[in-house]
Image (cartoon, rainbow, N blue to C red):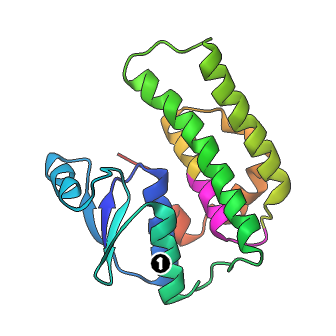
Amino acid sequence: MKLFGTTTSPYVRRVRVVAAELGEPIDWVNTATEAGQAALREVSPIRKVPVAIVDGRTLFDSRVIIDWLTTTRGHGELAPPRDRFRELNQVNAVDEALLSVLQLFALRRDGVAIDGNPFAQRQLDRADAIFQWLGKELSPRELGLPQLSVICALDWMDFRSTYPTERAEGLAAVRAAWRDRPSIASTLPHT
């Protein structure tokens, strides 16, 4: 699989973890470089990572890529969904919390003063509510897409110092249970 992305993206990391779990080799295209950005623009009108070329298909979005991999390769040691729609809701919740925090990160990175701003507070409150709900939903006893998604999101938030992850205390057991798993430990975000 040819994978376009960065080592910092929580969405790319999600794909990298699943690929590692399934033994799927990755031909890496680093989109943090000008050449990588040019290559990304050639294959994707969306211009967002991750993008994968696998089995002759160009796939956009981590969920689409993961769905293709697990449909065509199985789940390996990852827990397959028991209630697909419940787990899709859980992953969607993770993505929405991540989107809220990513928006704040992008605004700060671009020099927009947002501290104390009502928009910023709503985004943080939203992330808090989602993580509180997920803390009651996710079991640390299995590693499925919802668990690895929340791990990738919270690890990115720690890496970028974008959200105080100690506020997601209900998810501490999930993070601790899988922290040392090779697919998780080897894909921690880095520059």
Q: Is residue 149 above or below residue 70?
A: above
Residue 65 x %, y %: 45, 70
**SS assignment at label 1:** helix
Decide which of 60, 77 is in the foreground and name it.
Answer: 60
- The reply to whether residue 177 is visible in this rendering is yes
Residue 66 x %, y %: 50, 72
Q: How many marks?
A: 1
Residue 100 x %, y %: 58, 35
Q: Is residue 104 above or below residue 152?
A: above
Q: Is residue 110 above or below residue 11?
A: above
- The reply to whether residue 1 is visible in this rendering is no
Taking 138 as reference, is 21 left or right? left
Decide which of 119, 28 is in the foreground and name it.
Answer: 119
| Residue 108: quadrant of the picture | top left
Residue span colored magenta: 141-152
Residue at point 44%, 24% (across, down) = 107
Q: Quadrant of the N terminus?
A: bottom left
**Outermost residue, right direction?**
136
Q: Is residue 19 magenta?
A: no
Residue at point 74%, 44% (across, down) = 131
Majority secondary structure in the magenta region: helix
Taking 149 as reference, is 36 left or right? left
- List the residue tagged with mark 1: 68
Residue at point 26%, 52% (across, down) = 31
Residue 177 x %, y %: 72, 64
Decide which of 4, 77 is in the foreground and name it.
Answer: 4
Packing grade of label 1 (10 A; few <14, some 14-19, many >=20) is some
| Amino acid residing under circle 1 | Trp
| Residue 118: quadrant of the picture | top right
Decide which of 54, 45 is in the foreground and name it.
Answer: 45
Q: Quadrant of the C terminus?
A: top left
